Image: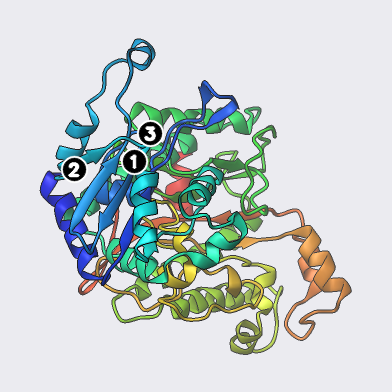
Amino acid sequence: MFSKKTYMDRRSVLKQNIDSGILLFLGNDDLGMNYADNTYHFRQDSTFLYYFGSDYAGLDAVIDLDEDKEIIFGDELTIDHIVWMGTQPTIKEKSEAVGISNTMPKAKLSEYISNAIAKGRKIHFLPPYRADHRVKLLDLLNISTSKQDSATSIEFVKAVVNQRNYKTQEEIVQIDDAVSITADMHIAAMKMARAGMKESEIAAAVQQVAIASGGQLSFPIIATIHGETLHNHYHGNTLKSGDMLLLDCGAENAMHYAGDMSSTFPVGKKFTNCQKDIYQIALNAHNAAVDALRPGTKFKDIHLLACKTIAEGMKSMGLMKGDMNEAVEMGAHALFFQCGLGHMMGLDVHDMENLGEQYVGYNGEEKSTMFGLKSLRLGRELEAGFVLTIEPGIYFIPELIDMWKADKKFEQFINYDKVEQYKDFGGCRNEEDFLITPDGKRLLGKAVPKTIAEVEALR
């Protein structure tokens, strides 16, 4: 945990940005995988962690703006719990550690909320993302699960986003740590991968690095020779000479801050000439985007710069033709780059995604509905304190190529006969994490080899 003052200051700032009512914070509970006592790994709700710090199941909290109260609700462990789980701090001790002296049993939350509703008071809650949260809201507020999303407090959402988006120095220390652990995960994989191994062996090795550091994974590992599938969590393929392995993984450190990096490397000691050509184009887009990072620049514009760099590279290889500015404007490049350039990162690997991309990544502006661009999670003007990823890639998706070719889509920009020769290429990307500083940007954590020469030297 951070200091008591950190959590008190965070709640103080939040209270200044919402006029009245009760702010309801739903903590996470243990959830059974296949029966009640066989639980998933517990992870506390990130917003609850941010304001209350308590990394324990079974807690909820309110900030009563009108009566100036802060209350944590939870039940003390019984002797039966202690036999199986060992001793833990009491609810009072957990609460006092973050500057809260008022605690109540969990059953009192319903009574507290009911009394407030009877007085006509506003109950602010954030968008639910778990089924048990929806059940809690149904019980507490009598709002059907189908209407809860539309009933969430936009005022509450914006206040949280506008606070959590700006990382403090103590948060940056934690993110640096998480990203350095993440870098160690990638370097371990780049050193060990050999023909004949299963993808699952790579996934197991990088997860070991995360857990040995005292943390966990920040998201499920992508370790695949089929990098054209953007979120490929299958690990059953055997690595062969001539393959490339795309690894996308991250560590969540002991303080629950995330790292998120991607690397692509040959299963053999060297890239093939074809792999080098495509890999270098993706790396050129990556470097162009990194060079453009600075406060005051719209991330959407940096994304489009990366798109144009990829399109120009494809044109140089004969896969695209015509005016690449026009091609990118119309979305033709998305045959090769279907996703976004990056996203915010912090306590969540996609920071606050449950609160809504339109607020976190777009500051309320409307998102594009164009294929490719609609997948850009961050488009807003960059500001000092933002932490984000840079991760352009190139992906040859056979089904997408076949569909566009059959529809004769963007024939003025795409040489489909040439593209057919690359349908079995797969995909590649590199990904790094950056802090936006007052005068530019800073790479977070350890660097991972990216250039062709650096990667081959490590192999």
* Foreground of the two, 117 or 133: 117
Q: In the figure, is residue 251 to the left or right of 264?
A: left
Residue type marked 1: Lys
Name the residue that disc number 2 marks: 102
* Foreground of the two, 240 or 263: 263
Residue farthest toward the left in the current orientation of the protein: 5
Q: Could you say which quadrant of the image residue 251 lies in?
A: top left
Q: Residue at image x 20%, y 39%?
A: 95
Q: Real-space Cα distance between discs 3 and 2? A: 18 Å
Of tags 3 and 2, the one toward the viewer is: 2
Mark 2 residue element: strand
Name the residue that disc number 3 marks: 57
Total marks shown come to 3
Residue farthest toward the right in the current orientation of the protein: 406
Residue type marked 2: Asn
Name the residue that disc number 1 marks: 108
Mark 3 residue element: loop
**Sequence-first disc among 1 and 3:** 3
